[in-house]
Image (tube, rainbow, N blue to C red):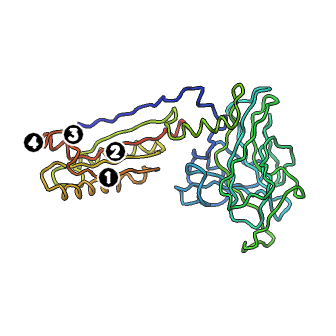
């Protein structure tokens, strides 16, 4: 009586969806939940640029440092410190090498965490070979992209987008983000309310949503931003829509054993998806008064959510319809059995494709 429907959505033209060459740009893909400090290796593709030990945070893993810019994952690193060798870097290998003389828009989002000191120049370095120091020390190179703020990036600014248009010298394949500026060239700000400066004070920043996108023709970073704003609410090319319906016995808000097993199996299958939004719509037949049926439909929604809750990330929209939205006639038992249902519709993406 029920069906599982999967739609692959191809709504946006290829020339609108410019390819981001950064794999796992929002730190959403991960091997396992971070549980503490120094666990950047638990997110996929990213690595430390020296022997420093950056952090990986996830809001759904009970290890976080405020809110990410988007999604659930983000990284954290020390960008200025009380020790001479306390600076950390985060790097990634791009999906493809940059094309010589082609123009690219390079961007990342940075946010200052509560720290003793804040700095003003945070940058990104593109190189043909992987940059890695076998020591915990600063890397004084000339980055192509640097935050152009004349004042330090402080927590009050929230997430700050650092963005620059560059022309490739050719074959750049690695991206490294951090502080490449010598200490005396920074504009700094002291946080007088920080409780533990001591010998181990530092400037700690959070990183999210990194992007390297080739510009076409006379296109600019501003053009890309306008396109992103236009399509931000549209599904991406690997978005999937899932739908399933579960049926209840008369005057019951718990599933039968057979329907319960079917729901659990569906839940197991849902774990492969990152859910963006879910709609839960519960209904009843018309055997009882309208007010009673509305309460019964709410109990059905609550029951379903109590089972699926751990896999339903993102926004959840609940509609408790009672007897108001029948899918069949309430004049016979066959129709009534179809009306005693909860429908779940999900929008998400396959984690393996991201």
Q: Which residue is mark 4?
A: 331
The total of numbered circles placed on residues is 4
Measured Cα–Cα span from mark 3 to mark 4: 12 Å
Q: Which residue is mark 3?
A: 327
Tag 2 near tag 1, CB within 8 Å? yes
Quadrant housing residue 13: top right
Along the polypeptide, which appears first: circle 1 or circle 4? 1
Measured Cα–Cα span from mark 2 to mark 3: 15 Å
Residues packed near mark 1 inside 10 Å, few (<14), some (14 to 19) or many (20 plus): many
State the SS at label 4: loop
State the SS at label 3: loop
Which image quarter holds the N terminus? Answer: top left
Name the foreground residue: 288 vs 87: 288
Measured Cα–Cα span from mark 2 to mark 1: 9 Å
Q: Which residue is mark 1?
A: 304
Tell me where residue 354 appears, x and y as whole percent: 56, 38
Which circle marks residue 334 in the picture?
none
Name the foreground residue: 241 vs 149: 149
State the SS at label 2: strand
Foreground disc of the pair 3, 1: 3
Q: Which residue is mark 2?
A: 344
Measured Cα–Cα span from mark 1 to mark 4: 27 Å
Residues packed near mark 3 inside 10 Å, few (<14), some (14 to 19) or many (20 plus): some
Residues packed near mark 2 inside 10 Å, few (<14), some (14 to 19) or many (20 plus): many
Tell me where residue 36 appears, x and y as whole percent: 62, 61
**Relative side of 131 to 337, left or right:** right
Along the polypeptide, which appears first: circle 2 or circle 3? 3
Along the polypeptide, which appears first: circle 4 or circle 2? 4
Tag 3 near tag 4, CB within 8 Å? no
Identity of the residue drawn at 73% across and 65% down: 115
């Amino acid at each position: 009586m029920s069906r599982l429907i999967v739609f692959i959505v191809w709504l946006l033209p290829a020339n609108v969806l410019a390819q981001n060459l950064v794999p796992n740009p929002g730190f959403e893909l991960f091997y396992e939940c971070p549980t503490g400090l120094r666990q950047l290796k638990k997110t996929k593709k990213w690595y430390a640029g020296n022997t420093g030990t950056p952090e990986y945070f996830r809001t759904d893993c009970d290890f976080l440092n405020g809110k990410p810019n988007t999604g659930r994952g983000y990284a954290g690193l020390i960008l200025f410190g009380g020790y001479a060798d306390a600076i950390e870097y985060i790097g990634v290998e791009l999906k493809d090498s940059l094309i010589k003389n082609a123009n690219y828009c390079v961007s990342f989002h940075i946010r200052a965490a509560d720290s003793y000191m804040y700095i003003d120049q945070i940058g990104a370095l593109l190189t043909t070979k992987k940059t890695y120091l076998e020591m915990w020390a600063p890397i004084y190179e000339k980055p192509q992209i640097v935050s152009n703020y004349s004042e330090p990036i402080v927590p009050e600014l929230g997430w700050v987008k650092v963005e620059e248009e560059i022309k490739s010298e050719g074959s750049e394949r690695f991206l490294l983000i951090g502080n490449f500026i010598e200490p005396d060239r920074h504009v700094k700000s002291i946080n007088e309310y920080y409780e533990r400066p001591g010998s181990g004070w530092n400037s700690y920043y959070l990183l999210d949503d990194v992007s390297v996108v080739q510009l076409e023709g006379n296109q600019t970073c501003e053009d890309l931003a306008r396109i992103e704003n236009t399509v931000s609410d549209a599904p991406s090319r690997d978005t999937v829509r899932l739908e399933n319906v579960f049926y209840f016995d008369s005057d019951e808000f718990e599933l039968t054993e057979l329907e319960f097993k079917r729901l659990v199996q569906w839940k197991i299958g849902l774990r492969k998806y990152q859910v963006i939004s879910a709609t839960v719509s519960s209904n009843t037949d018309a055997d009882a008064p309208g007010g009673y049926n509305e309460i019964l439909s709410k109990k059905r929604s609550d029951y379903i959510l109590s089972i699926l809750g751990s896999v339903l990330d993102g926004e959840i929209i609940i509609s408790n319809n009672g007897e108001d939205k029948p899918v069949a006639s309430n004049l016979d038992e066959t129709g009534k059995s179809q009306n005693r249902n909860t429908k779940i519709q999900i929008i998400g993406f396959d984690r393996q494709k991201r």
